[in-house]
Each structure stands twice: as structure tokens, then as C-alpha cells.
Image (cartoon, rainbow, N blue to C red):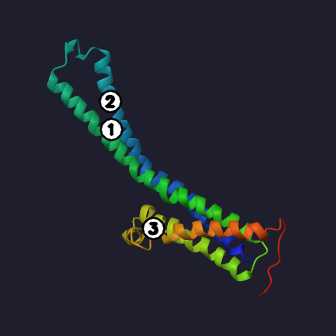
Amino acid sequence: MIGKKNVVFGFLFLALSAILGPVMIVKYIPDVQATATAKQEKIGFLQQAAESGFEVDLEPMDAKTLAQANTKAVLALSADLNSQSAMDMIKGGPHAHGNLEALLNIVVGIFLGFVAAKRLFKQIISWMFIIGTLMHAGLLYASRALGQGWADSIMFSPVGPVGPALIVLGLVLCGVIAITGFRGEPVRDKLM
């Protein structure tokens, strides 16, 4: 079965993508929790001040104290947002795209087993999805999750769009061969 390699690759890539969840938790959650606590402390002080009519110990707050409290709250809010950005970059890039492209490989691998088409054509589609996934989600993994600068260089070069383009073209070709070749039952591929 020509699509078997896509199914195997898809499950392995999906497992790799699933591993990113615990990696993000172990690596980034402590910083996110610390900055969230600091933010809540600084903003909490301002909330209490506002609720008490900007009085502290029954004395009106002076402009300098209020300005300093505002500055500390804004800086704490900024630090909190910045601490989440690294994790968000992983969730929105390699984690999401890795899951999607792994599942696409599994589906395409199974689909190719139900399509009567020339063996070479099915092989081309099969490899388009594997290479496309490696050149898109694979580079996102290397860049965002592993911090490899060379992956960014490739992604933002003229070669960068090749991965996503291969996947989209593969989807279009799957649609084309489904029109005439989809059988609804497993198809035995001829050697030629």
C-alpha cells in the first residue's frame, strides 16, 4: 500500500507534536506563573486604591505614588504578556501545524489505499505530503521549539513556501484523482 508510509509518518509526527505540550509546560509555565502573580499583585494594589477612592491608610495618594503604582502595573502586565509569547509561538506554529499536517498524512495515506490511479502518481502525492510536512511543520519545530536559527533562514527564504505549497498541491491532486479513481474499498496497486 503506497500510503502506508504516510500513515506511519503521520502517527510518529503526531506523537512528536504531542510531546511539545509537556515541553511547553516544563519550560515556560513557571515563568508564566511568576509573571502572572507579579502582575496580579501590582494591578491588585491599583484596584484597591481605586475602590478606596485613591486613599491609603485614610490618606489621599499623592500623584507620585499613583504614577509609580501605574508604572509598576504596566510593566508587570507587559512582563506577563511577554512571558506568554514564547509559548504562544509554539502553540500557534509547530504544535498546531504539526498536529494538522500529521493528521493530513494519516488521512491521505488511508485515502491512497482507496484510489485506483497510476502507482507513480500516487507515490508523487504520498511524497508531496511527507516532504511538505517536513519543510513546513518540521522547520517550525526546528525554529520555534528548538531555537535553530538556520530553520528561520530557510523559512524566510524563497524556498520557505515550498512546504505549504506541496501540501496544498497534494490536496488538489487528491481531489483530482478522487473524481475518477475513488473506489470506496481498498484497491490493490499494480506494480507498473
Q: Residue at x 45, y 61 (%)?
A: 145
Disc 1 crowd rating (10 Å Cα; few below 14, some 14-19, many 20+) is some
Q: Are marks 1 and 2 in contact (CB under 8 Å)?
A: yes
User: Which residue was labeled with disc 3?
Assistant: 142
Q: Which label sits in the foreground, 3 or 2?
A: 3
User: Which residue was labeled with disc 2?
Assistant: 43
Q: Residue furthest right?
A: 185
Does label 3 or label 2 sit earlier along the sequence? Answer: 2
Can residue 15 be spotted in the picture? no
Asked which quadrant contains residue 102, the reply is bottom right
Amino acid of disc 1: Leu
Please state which of residues 10 and 115 is positioned toward the viewer in this rendering.
115
Is label 2 in a helix, a strand or a loop? helix
Q: Residue furthest top?
A: 58
Amino acid of disc 2: Ile
Q: Residue at x 24, y 17 (%)?
A: 54
**Residue 32 x/y as whole percent:** 40, 45
**Residue 12 x/y as whole percent:** 62, 67
**Residue 11 x/y as whole percent:** 65, 65
Please give the label number shown on residue 77: 1
